[in-house]
Image (tube, helix red, strand yellow):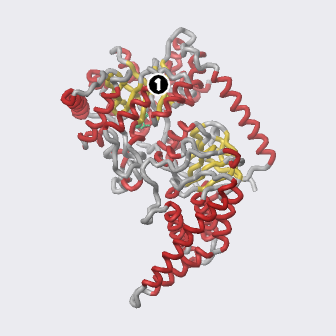
Amino acid sequence: MTFSIHGLAVARGIAIGRAVLVASSRVDVAHYFIQHDQVAAEIDRLRQARNAVVDELKRLQQELTADAPPELGALLDVHLMLLEDESLSAGVKQWIEERFYNAEWAVSSQMEVIGRQFDEMEDAYLRERKSDLEQVTERVLHFLKGGTSPVVRTKPHARPQQELQLGDTMDVPLVLVAHDLSPADMLQFKQSVFTGFVTDVGGKTSHTAIVARSLDIPAVVGARSASQLIRQDDWVIIDGDMGVVIVDPSPIILAEYGFKQRQGDLERERLSRLRHTPAVTLDGQKIELLANIEMPEDADAAVLAGAVGVGLFRSEFLFMGRQGNLPEEDEQFEQYRRAIEGMKGLPVTIRTVDVGADKPLDEARHDAAHLNPALGLRAIRWSLADPEMFLTQLRAILRAAALGKVNLLVPMLAHASEIHQTLALVKQAQRDLDARGVAYGNVRLGAMIEIPAAALSLKLFLKHFDFLSIGTNDLIQYTLAIDRADETVAHLYDPLHPAVLRLIADTIAEGAAQGKSVSVCGEMAGDVGMTRLLLGMGLRSFSMHPSQVLLVKQQILRADTEKLKTLAAKVLDSEDPASLLLA
Ligand code: PEP
Ligand code: MG
């Protein structure tokens, strides 16, 4: 039966495919297709892993001493029984034989199917047996990986065969459905088989949503109970424009969305012709369109979209999911070098690490003890708390600046003391490199304006920095006291709130008055509904996901900044700005 689920639209377009449900803890289980002639070998690999678990459990059973609690023996019996369960093993085999899933993927898919049957059981005792099933599954997955301790997650930044060989085995498009995905998990799915994403939680400017947008595939977040309502292998339509997920669509609905999908493809093709057109308004104002990137390889998409540089390289993605093994200077230098070379001589703005809040370094270190992580040791606060780590990053960025035009951007500054410490550490990093005789280049220094306190102390910032970049995602979060990652308050996360608009307008005006460049690099910059307003406020530099660049350029080509000044003045004065922007 067809039904729909409503969430938040985060990445445009339509995806139609079969659902792959993934438990958050199993996101980095390898997902890849095997070739037709590998089926027998894959089933054999599975059999060996299963036998290894059976042997292990039997050995444990034998080793049980007479005084061991009787529940332990019973538990091992249950686990052994589950391993011999026909529906589990036949189901897993079916995923391999019919879908050509690798064994790990097949095991976790079947685990989701059977897990649901347990959830629906009336008897509470039987229902609780789901945790036994999960433990058995983890053991099998562990043996499939060939490990020796029951670890579920893979090594840092290991991208288990996610660079899939699609080949002729891939005949069914797949969409990923999960309760939650961390930004690092999301990043793992770059170049994966999935053509769309749905998550139960998350806000529009949560970092998971931001990464989804950078993948440029349709995504809906904050879809509440989607991962409960959608079953493994259901046909699903993800409408990333409207934030709707349609489950088990009828043929008529499928045909309608198939048509929309083709229209979207045509529109993209039409837009791609604007790539080499300069971004100049009708009244001759030149606008700078920059790209936001998360990894060096994203530079390709930025160049392809016609961006004239990178306005925000979120360097923290190089630090995440590494179980605390932070990248050394040489490794960071190498990644920055790749981004600079990828941009082919265009400037690259590298933001120093911004971990914390909804970007934990890794799940294990996601410190729930901090009640308000967004107000805690995040971004520059984290960097200044560990000067050696910060100096390592600064040296790597300065070295990279010898290879091209590099701007250094600092997130979350609010206090004069933080500014002074940061600038002193930049000098210290230069001295370190001088002492080592290592070449480095000049950088323009920029500050993010993303805390209201910063937007209200612009003189201080303009005195010390060459440029400013407005992080609207956080500026809205901190001005309105709305957690950007919390879908329950997403309706209050309002970029058009007069207080937010006032802070943005003042920052742009103050920067212009002092001849310093001001950019917006939050999601507002890539929102075509905001382009006219920002132009009217005097903004001349926008930084956004590569996928948005041409859409925003289209708006710019149709705009007259003189006329938009009047619109901006009215919007700033209005109680209902949205209605003025729609007019
Ligand atoms: C912002 O806050 O607007 C921003 C660009 O930084 P991030 O989204 O990474 O916090
Ligand atoms: Mg921010």
Classify residue 389 by image quadrant.
top left
Indicate left or right for 569 with 227 as reference.
Answer: left
Image coords of residue 250 (percent x, y): 78, 50
Amino acid at dot 1:
Met
Instruction: Indicate whether 99 appears above or below 271.
Output: below
Q: Which residue is mark 1?
A: 343
Depth check: give the residue in front, 166 or 495.
166
The N terminus sits in image quarter = bottom right
Q: With respect to residue 563, does 144 lie above or below?
A: below
Residue 119 seen anywhere in this rendered image of the structure? yes
Query: Which quadrant of the figure shows ligand 2?
Result: top left
Is 494 above or below relative to 162? above
Answer with the quarter of the image where residue 502 lies.
top left
Residue 161 image position (x, y, % from top left): 54, 49
Q: Residue at x 39, y 49 (%)?
A: 322
The spot of residue 350 in percent (x, y) is 38, 30
Q: Residue at x 56, y 44 (%)?
A: 163
Q: Residue at x 30, y 22 (%)?
A: 441
How many numbered marks does the figure carry?
A: 1
